[in-house]
Image (tube, grey):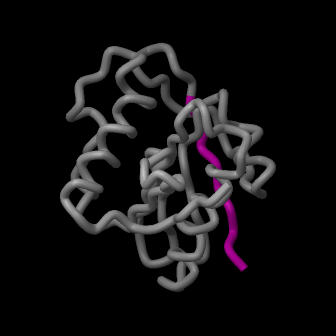
């Protein structure tokens, strides 16, 4: 399967990118479209995965926390493309961005349903964190970059 990982650059890409993020991560919980966009959008590195038909099937974002740490947020893969390495490819793209920016660590808050994905990519669980919309348990995870 031909997959392309890149940063969105055109308005149409960003529209589709944000839409997929909302559709997967917030819509099922009753969240508004604006709930998947925050103050870090314009100071972040964004990744999207497109299939052979140029359709965005996965997304993710990374932004600075401080001089040594970046945070990954809004990782989402279309249901039909899960378990096809899409998430791994997006994660690798974001980790490479952190390495280029000379960061030592990546942190993220993973949904309970995604813990094994991140553990399999060498992230460590540090603590139980917040409940999104009072129902979706998250865990603080961290990875030291080499």
In this image, 119 relative to 1: left or right? right
Q: Position of residue 133 (x, y in %)?
A: 39, 18
Q: Residue at x 48, y 23 (%)?
A: 131
Look at the picture and state if 48 lies above or below 34: below
Question: Is 27 situated above or below 11?
Answer: above
Q: Which residues are magenta?
A: 138-146
Which quadrant holds the C terminus?
A: bottom right
* Residue 78: % across, % down: 53, 36
Secondary structure, magenta segment, majority class? strand
Q: Nearer the viewer, residue 145 or 74?
A: 74
Q: Is residue 50 left or right of residue 45?
A: right
Q: Relative to the observer, which residue lies in front, 1 or 125?
A: 1
- Residue 140 belongs to the span the image colors magenta: yes
Q: Is residue 36 magenta?
A: no
User: Residue pushed farthest front?
Assistant: 53
The percent position of residue 59, horizontal first and vertical second, equals 46, 50
Q: Quadrant of residue 81?
A: top right
Q: Tell me which residue sits at (58%, 63%) in the image.
A: 106
Q: Residue at x 68, y 62 (%)?
A: 143
Q: Position of residue 24 (x, y in %)?
A: 45, 30
**Quadrant assignment, res 19:** top left
Residue occupying image coordinates x 57% and y 59%: 90
């Amino acid at each position: 399967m031909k997959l392309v990982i890149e940063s969105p650059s055109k308005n149409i890409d960003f529209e589709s990118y944000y839409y997929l993020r909302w559709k997967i991560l917030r819509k099922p919980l009753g969240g508004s479209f604006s709930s998947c966009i925050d103050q870090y959008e314009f100071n972040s590195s964004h990744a999207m995965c497109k299939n052979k038909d140029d359709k965005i099937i996965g997304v993710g974002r990374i932004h600075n926390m401080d001089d040594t740490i970046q945070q990954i947020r809004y990782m989402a893969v279309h249901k039909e493309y899960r378990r096809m390495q899409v998430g791994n490819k997006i994660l690798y793209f974001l980790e490479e961005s952190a390495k280029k920016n000379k960061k030592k660590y990546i942190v993220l808050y993973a949904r309970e349903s995604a813990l094994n994905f991140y553990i399999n990519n060498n992230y460590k669980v540090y603590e139980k964190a917040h409940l999104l919309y009072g129902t979706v348990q998250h865990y603080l995870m961290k990875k030291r970059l080499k």
